[in-house]
Amino acid sequence: MTLLAPAQTDLLDLTPEELTDALAALGHKPYRARQILAAVWRRLAGSFDEMTDMPQSLREELGRRYVIGAARVEEVARSEDVRTAKYLFALGDGAHIEAVAMREEGRLTACLSSQVGCAMGCAFCATATLGFTRNLTCGEMLAQALLISRLEARITNIVFMGMGEPLLNVPSLLKAVAALADPSRFGLGTRKITISTCGIIPGIEALAESAAPVRLALSLNSPFDDQRRELMPVSARYPLAEVLAACDAYTGRTGKPVLLEYVLLRGINTSPASARELVRIARRLDGKVNLIEYNPTQGLPFRAPETPETLRFRDLLMKEGVTVTIRFRRGRDIAAGCGQLAARRIGAARPPGGRP
Ligand code: SAH
């Protein structure tokens, strides 16, 4: 994939209908759109030159008008065990975003970004130190998935847990999800796509009403509203009780239980009292809990728990019958935590309010 020239359109921003109409306006038959879509999504073609089932003149015309995804790979870092690869992408305006590919038992999960930077200001998060630049386009989200599929293997699962808050970019996100779930395009089941939010209630509601409701994950990180507000300022705007009610409604509407994500911060949210309250919330939502070992971020005053602290916390949840998974800090040798590679690259990893 290459970057957009001024007169070009990102093909990945178009719905199949829009592509068909655009080609019709140029005098081409609808089957050309189907051919292009099959090349892009089935054969993972990255350029029109590869579409040898179409005449040369058409390929050249398409190449002048369109790019297939306005992003290019700038850097790939692979963990020592080679199962985790972190991608740094450059976008048309010079912005950088990142995505992570994780291989596990026959699965390839891609963790995608939804914004350049983030405005949520979570105290522990590397992306927060970058501040917010802009929303990603639908095409920029899809380009991450296509490039990873092309360079690694077919993606089997997608999580929007990279940079940014996906539910503050709902129109483009829903368009991208539609392409990912469409059997004639990326063709992932809606159960294989997860959107992770810090708790944006209107976004949760919009997702529940959407045509293809996917799985929702809530970054809880503390079961106590006051502590959560300190870690995640968004909680002042959308208090925990109201977010949990929106999650209940999401499950009621879609039949999909909400996954609770919980980043373990040493000495902060790993007490037995935290575990008890987390059990209460998990039972109420009928949801699984995904414990995430904190990925230490330069300049931020948080640490990961030692393994016994992690396991003790997990056991407290399991004893109460809660289904728990742990994401250990895989890929820490390549700074695979959210926003860490881009932060290092841009050189902006510093505490919010710290000296530039
Ligand atoms: N804004 C969305 C998605 C991006 S953050 C959200 O808040 O869910 C994705 C997940 O990474 C969140 O659960 C967040 O709490 C977690 N996270 C952020 N920084 C982290 C770090 N340094 N180590 C481990 N997890 C982190």
Image: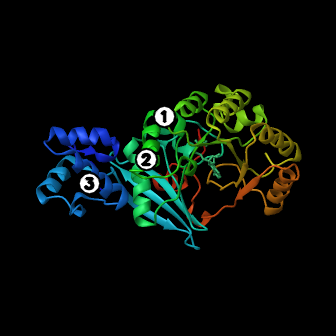
> Label 1: which residue?
170
Name the mark nearer the viewer: 1 or 3.
Answer: 3
> Label 2: which residue?
182
Going from N to C along the chain, the mark reached first, 2 or 1, is 1
**Neighbourhood count class around disc 3 (C-alpha, 10 Å): few under 14, some 14–19, many 20 upward:** few
Residue 285: which quarter of the image? top right
Give the amino acid at mark 3. Gln
Going from N to C along the chain, the mark reached first, 1 or 3, is 3
**What x and y, as percent, mark residue 251?**
66, 36
Going from N to C along the chain, the mark reached first, 2 or 3, is 3
Query: Which one is in front, 240 or 284?
Result: 284
Give the spatial CA distance, label 1 vs label 3. 29 Å
> Label 3: which residue?
35
Residue 133 in view, yes or no: no
**Neighbourhood count class around disc 1 (C-alpha, 10 Å): few under 14, some 14–19, many 20 upward:** some
Circle 1: element type: helix
Residue 240 in view, yes or no: yes
Residue drawn at (78%, 42%) of the image:
282
What colour-coding does the image apply? rainbow
Circle 3: element type: helix
Circle 2: element type: loop
Asked if the residue under mark 3 is in contact with the one under mark 2, i.e. CB atoms within 8 Å, the reply is no
Say if 352 sits above or below 48 in the image.
above
Give the amino acid at mark 1. Val
Say if 145 sits above or below 286 in the image.
below
Query: Which residue is at the far left?
Result: 57
Query: Which residue is at the far bottom?
Result: 81
- Horizontal arrangement in the rendering, residue 22 relative to residue 200 (left or right): left
Residue 48: which quarter of the image? bottom left
**What x and y, as percent, mark residue 310?**
79, 57
**Neighbourhood count class around disc 2 (C-alpha, 10 Å): few under 14, some 14–19, many 20 upward:** some
- Horizontal arrangement in the rendering, residue 230 relative to residue 190 (left or right): right
